[in-house]
Image (cartoon, grey):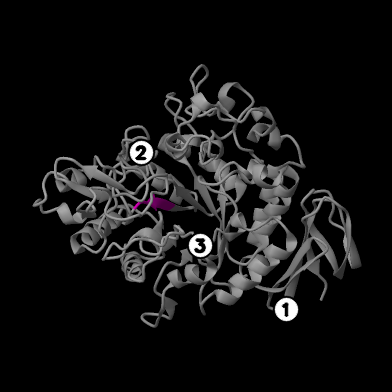
Amino acid sequence: MSEITKLWWRDGVIYQIYPRSFQDSNGDGVGDLGGILARLDYLVALGVDAVWISPFYPSPMADFGYDVANYCDVDPLFGTLSDFDALAQAIHQRGLKLILDFVPNHTSNQHPWFVESRSSRTNPKRDWYLWRDPAPDGGPPNNWMSHFGGPAWTLDAATGQFYYHAFLAEQPDLNWRNPDVRKAMYAAMRFWLDRGVDGFRMDVLWLLIKDDLFRDNPQSGEPVFNADQPETQAIVRHMRAVLDEYSDRVLIGEIYLPLKSLVRYYGEPEEDPVPHLDGAQLPFNFHLILTAWEAEPIARLIRDYEDALPTGAWPNYVLGNHDQKRLASRIGPEQARVAAVLLLTLRGTPTLYYGDELGMPDARISADQVRDPAERNQPGLGRGRDPERSPMLWENRENAAFTAPGVATWLPLVWDWANFTVETEEADQGTMLKLYRRLLALRRERPELFAGSIEDVQAESGVLSYVRSYKGKRISVMLNLTGEERWMECAAGRVLLSSFLDRENVVAGWIELRRNEAVVIEQYA
C-alpha cells in the first residue's frame, strides 16, 4: 500500500460522541471531557480514525449546548480548557483526529453579543442579529416558522421589535450578512484550530443566510426564503479558506437538502495551490437515513448520489446521529447488522454514532423524563430526540459504568441495557461490536474499500449489491435486506466476511444469502 497517499478525512472513519452521554468522570450523572479521555483506548481498539464531539461550549443548555454563550471556552459541566487541551493531546497521541461541532447559525440569548444587541436599537451590535418591526397587525414580520414549532419570531418588548430564531426563542440567529459577525466567527474557529483541532462539523450550515427582503414563504411551508440561500455558498468558501490556513483540516457541513442542492456545498473548482473544490470537503449526506430501507430505493440513491457529485468531490454516508432514531430501532436489530456492512463498504467517508456499534436501541422515555425542547414544545408529536441520546453502555454493573453507583443518569439507560454493554459483547464472538471491529479492520486493510471505485450497483429480489474496485482487484458486497433466504448469482471468490461472522468460504457462481445476511466477497482474478 506504499503507493497510496491516504487522507484521514477521506479514507478514515469518523465516530460521533454526544459528550453528555459517553462517560461521566466526576459523578454528576452527565458525561464530560474527562470521561471521553478515559475511554479513548476503546475507540482505538474499535478502529475508527477521527472523533467528532458535539458541543461542550458554555451554555444555559436550553438546547443542550447548541445554544452557545461563549464560543471560546468549555462549559464547567464538561470540564475546563485545560481538560480540553489534555483530551486533544491524548487523541493525537493515539493517532486519532479531533473534530469539533461548531454552531455558526445562532447563539444563546445569554451570549454577550445578544445581550448587547437587544439593549437598544442603536447598540453597535444591533445588526449582529435579525431584528424586524412588527407586521401592520402587530404580529410577527413574516410567516417563517421555527424548526421546534411555532413562529420563528419573538417580540422584544423593551425595543419593540421581533428577533428571528430558526429554533428556540433562546437561540437567536446571527446576521451572517454583517462583516463583523463573520470576522468574530472566523476568529472563534481559529481559536480552536490554534489549539490543534483537525476540523469542524458545522451545525445547520444551509440555514446561515436569510432572504434580505424577509419575504413570506409559500403557504406550503417550504422554506424558500430562510434556507439554502445562494449567498450561503460564499460563507462556506470563507470558512474553508480559514481551515486552509492550517494543514490537513476538514470542513463538514450539516445539510438536510435534496442531492442536487446538497452537492453545491462542495463548492467550485480551485487550482491554487493544487486542484480542489473550495467548499466543504464533506457536506453530510443523510439520505441513507431518510430513504426507505429497501434494496431498490437504496441502489437508486447510491447511483443518483454518485452521478450528482462534482468532479473531485468525495462522498460520505451517515446512518445515525443525535437527531435521528437509533439505527437498531429504525430498521430492527437484524437489519442493523446488514446496515453496518453497507455503511463501511460504500465508497466515501462513513460516520458512526456512539453506541450503534453495540446495536443500542432507543431508550424508553416517559413523559416525566423528557429533556429535549423539541418534544417539550410540541408534546405528543414524537419529535423528541432523547431516546437516541441515552448513556453509553460500558460494563455489567450499576449505571452500566457510565457514572458512579447511586448517581442518577441525566437520561435513563435503554431498558435491557445489560444485553448491549461493551463487556457483554466482548465475551461473545458473534456480537455487533465484533462485527464492527472486523469491518473497520477490513476497511483499513483493503484499498478496494477505502479508496476504490464503486460499480455495478444493483437491486434484485430485495438484495442490494455492488462492486468495489481498485487497481484490478475487486470486492463484491451483497446485502439481503429481506427476512427470506435468497440464492444469488455471484462471481467466483472467497467470502471475507459475513454479517453473522460465521463463514469465510469459497463461492463459485452462486451464493445462498441467509435471511438478513450481508457478505463481502473477494473476487478471484
* Secondary structure mostly seen in the magenta stretch: strand
Residue 70 location, quadrant: top left
Q: Which residue is found at the position 11% from the left and 46% from the top?
A: 120
The residue indicated by pointer 3 is 8
Q: Secondary structure at mark 3?
A: helix
Q: Is residue 186 visible?
A: yes
Q: CA distance from mark 2 to mark 1?
A: 48 Å
Q: Secondary structure at mark 2?
A: helix
Check whether the beta carbons of the residues at disc 1 and disc 3 lie within 8 A of each other: no
Q: Residues within 10 Å of mark 3 (few under 14, many from 20)?
A: some
The residue indicated by pointer 2 is 83
Q: CA distance from mark 2 to mark 3?
A: 25 Å
Q: Is residue 129 visible?
A: no
> Considering only order in the chain, which callout, 3 or 2, is on the residue closer to the N terminus?
3
Front-most of residues 404 and 355: 355
Q: Which mark is residue 472?
A: 1
Q: CA distance from mark 1 to mark 3?
A: 24 Å
Percent x, y for residue 471?
68, 78
Q: Which mark is residue 58?
A: none
Check the image and name the residue furthest to the bottom.
271
Magenta-drawn segment: 99-103
Q: Secondary structure at mark 1?
A: loop
Q: Amino acid at mark 2?
A: Asp
Check the image and name the residue furthest to the front.
137
Q: Which residue is found at the position 42% from the left and 62% from the top?
A: 250
Percent x, y for residue 311?
52, 80
Q: Residues within 10 Å of mark 1 (few under 14, many from 20)?
A: few
Front-most of residues 391 and 222: 222
Q: Amino acid at mark 1?
A: Gly
Q: Amino acid at mark 3?
A: Trp
Residue 459 location, quadrant: bottom right
